[in-house]
Image (tube, rainbow, N blue to C red):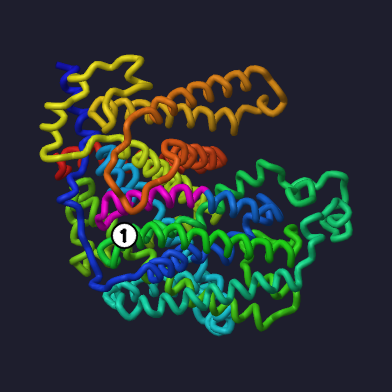
Amino acid sequence: MLRQALRRFGQKLVRRHPLKKVFAYSTGIKLSTLDLVALGVGRTVGVGVYFLANEVASNQAGPAIVICFLVAGLTSLLAGLCYAEFSVRVPHHGSAYLYTYVTVGELWAFITGWNLILSFVVDVFVVVQAWTLPFDILSGTLHESISEQVPQFFADNVGYFFVLFFFFFMEFQYWWWHDFFRIFKVVTLVKLLVLGFVIISGFIKGNLHNWKLTEEDYVQAGLNGTSSLGPLGSGGFMPFGFQGILRGSATCFYTFIGFSILVTRVKESHNPQSSIPMGIVVSLLICILVYFGVSAALTLMVPYYLLRPGSTLPEIFLHIGWAPAYYVLVIVIFCNVFVYAYRSFTFPIHQLIYMMAEDGLLFPVLARIHTGTYVRIVSTVIFVTIAAIMVFFFGLTDLLDLRSVGTLISYSLVAFCVLIIRYQPERTGNEAQVQEENGPEAEKLTLQGLFFPGSPTPTPLSGQVVYVCSSLLALLLTLLCLVLAHWPGLLSGDPGPITVVVLLLVLITGLTGVIWRQPQSSTPLPFKVPALPLLPLLSIFVNVYLMMQMTAGIWLRFGVWMLIGFAIYFSYGIQQSLVA
């Protein structure tokens, strides 16, 4: 009895979404490949570029921030390739939530969706922070004029109250997408031109010596009078060492998250099977070049120890005496944040919550978030309230790391899904019937069959083998990342951790070989992830290793968020799921 109950409970956790019931939404316009590239670049090169580089360079990586952006960009590119295959394999309007639901089941889909909600809520905070920066500069006169007539608290936080008003005003402009997308493309072009000006300025006014700073430079600057540089690092191109590059890469990962917006535009694309993958890859490559150039210009123009946490990109022009360029860049930030917040925040989070509520995983009242103006406004009140709490209790870097953890988990699950679905048999008719007639128990699993399967096409048994091996690989890769990141004796040549690493690598290699020998689906697709199973496994490894760079405080906050989510799922979602 207990065994049957546990089996039924386990089946509920892995039940999968039928594609014929997926959510479909369209704005009524058609997007070309160029439009998708513009959307991906505009969404990815968002508000983070204006202040995150200063934050990371000042106390995490120094001039080596250029490497941080490369590592973060290549990590996102690996995830982007996995997204690209899913966009052609599951050509439905959706996200990582839908892809996970279709492939590995309900529980993992809820975890993915819940993490994406966290990401969007943190985005509200980032938008609030980003807009208050130029608003504080442009409204200095306003602050001085009202500070004597209202309480000090309101005068000091006038920017935040203006942003709250902006979000509510934005809800009433929700249906202006057709005309607004033209503005979005223009602002994206202007933003790239301005950032190009920043990059060119860095090579004109930059000083290569800022990448080779020594202790004497700190002493001459009056920042350090002792023999130890302390919080300033150790000088040179990598003042905070290799660990600083890894920590900075984990933080910089936030800046590449926006490309996933493209998979929500399947129904609006002329040819989604080719334009979505092309848009994802091209937009990510452009963003990698932009971030690399901006971070290089920043650290060449200003010594990293002069970059204050919380400072913004325009301040580098004050350092070199180009005040007009400073104000131009501030205005560009102001316009960019407006465009970024208009569709990049409200549309994805409303859409995701609608999908999860329609599937029965969240409360049904939230299913009216797309059709009911009242519900949409109430949801915006909730999100902005949570963001306001975050403003007063959490630091910017901590929240960006919290968002990165949730997104890295989602990206890892998408890579895991690609690894699984490529080796599964085609679904024809009722899935349960197929499993009953051709289930794994009808075939015999042998050691020879693991490396020399008898069928050239995927079977239920080979699909089950890949599923189990992939799950074990995910566990082993996590253990490997833990050892590499947190076992101090590894670099000193201690035989203990070295033996553990070698053993883990042997097991990982063996399981990878088993997956490699299994037959793949022969379904022709416009785009497939190359070098399977290596590339998805590499994506999972890099994602997990970046997550291991997060502090215990970040994981504690993330654990609290996940406990809230599990309480909702196991008390409501698992019983009310429409897939049941």
Where is residue 551? Give x, y as percent.
Answer: 56, 40
How many numbered markers are drawn? Answer: 1
Badge 1 crowding class, 10 Å Cα cut-off, few under 14, some 14 to 19, many 20 or more, is many
Quadrant where the C terminus is found in the figure: top left
Amino acid type of the residue tagged 1 in the rendering: Thr
Tell me which residue sits at (68%, 65%) in the image.
Answer: 298
Q: Is residue 215 left or right of residue 515?
A: right
Q: Is residue 250 left or right of residue 441?
A: right
Tell me which residue sits at (27%, 59%) in the image.
Answer: 351
SS for dot 1:
helix
Quadrant where the N terminus is found in the figure: top left
Residue 141 quadrant: bottom right
Q: Is residue 453 magenta?
A: no
Where does label 1 land, which residue?
Answer: 264
Tell me which residue sits at (69%, 29%) in the image.
Answer: 491
Where is residue 169? Give x, y as percent.
Answer: 34, 76
Where is residue 2? Give x, y as percent.
Answer: 18, 17
Question: Is 151 rendered above or below residue 433?
Answer: below
**Magenta stretch in the rendered image:** 75-95
Q: Is residue 386 visible?
A: no
Q: Is residue 407 visible?
A: yes
Q: Is residue 514 left or right of residue 295?
A: left
Judging depth in this view, the residue of 408 and 157 nearest the camera is: 408
Where is residue 96? Give x, y as percent.
Answer: 34, 49
Please tell me whether the stretch drawn in magenta is mainly helix, strand or loop.
helix
Tell me which residue sits at (75%, 78%) in the image.
Answer: 321
Question: Is 377 rendered above or below residue 335?
Answer: above
